[in-house]
Image (cartoon, rainbow, N blue to C red):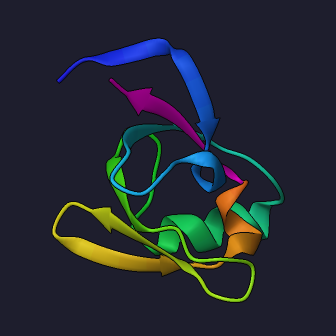
Amino acid sequence: MEMDTGQFCTLQDLKVRQKGRVIALTGEHESCARIESMGIHVGCNLEVIHAGDRANPALVAVGDARLAIGHDLLDNILIAIET
């Protein structure tokens, strides 16, 4: 699997079926701790299953797990987009 190191975005900006690797968690300590408690950490690969909207969480595949992530956290997860 190759990653284009020139393409970065937040998890909020990934499209459905788009894949990437977490390169940083940003924001307040509490937000980062909450994200890590879900199993999302720097270096893990993920895929957007359902983008959701402001009222509904996004559904993200991390390994064999499927996680619902609220939009308040999506901008705190920086992604290198898989090409």
Q: Is residue 54 above or below residue 43?
A: below
Query: Which of these two is toward me, 71 or 41?
Result: 71
Is 81 magenta? The answer is yes
Number of numbered discs overlaid on the protein picture: 0
Q: Is residue 73 above or below residue 57?
A: above
Residue 33 is left or right of residue 59, and the answer is right
- Residue 70 placed where, x, y %? 64, 79
Query: Which of these two is toward me, 59 or 35?
Result: 59
Is 67 magenta? The answer is no
- Residue 59 placed where, x, y %? 43, 75
> Which residue is at 57% across, 67% downward?
35
- Residue 30 placed where, x, y %? 76, 70
Give the image quarter of residue 33: bottom right
- Residue 53 placed where, x, y %? 66, 77
> Which residue is at 49% across, 51% downward?
15
| Secondary structure that dominates the magenta span | strand
Give the farthest residue toward the right.
28
Q: Is residue 8 above or below residue 56?
A: above
> Which residue is at 30% across, 65% downward?
61
Q: Over which residues does the magenta segment extend?
A: 76-83
> Which residue is at 40% across, 77% downward?
67
Give the farthest residue toward the bottom.
55
Quadrant in which the N terminus is drawn? top left
Quadrant in which the C terminus is drawn? top left
Give the image quarter of residue 6: top right
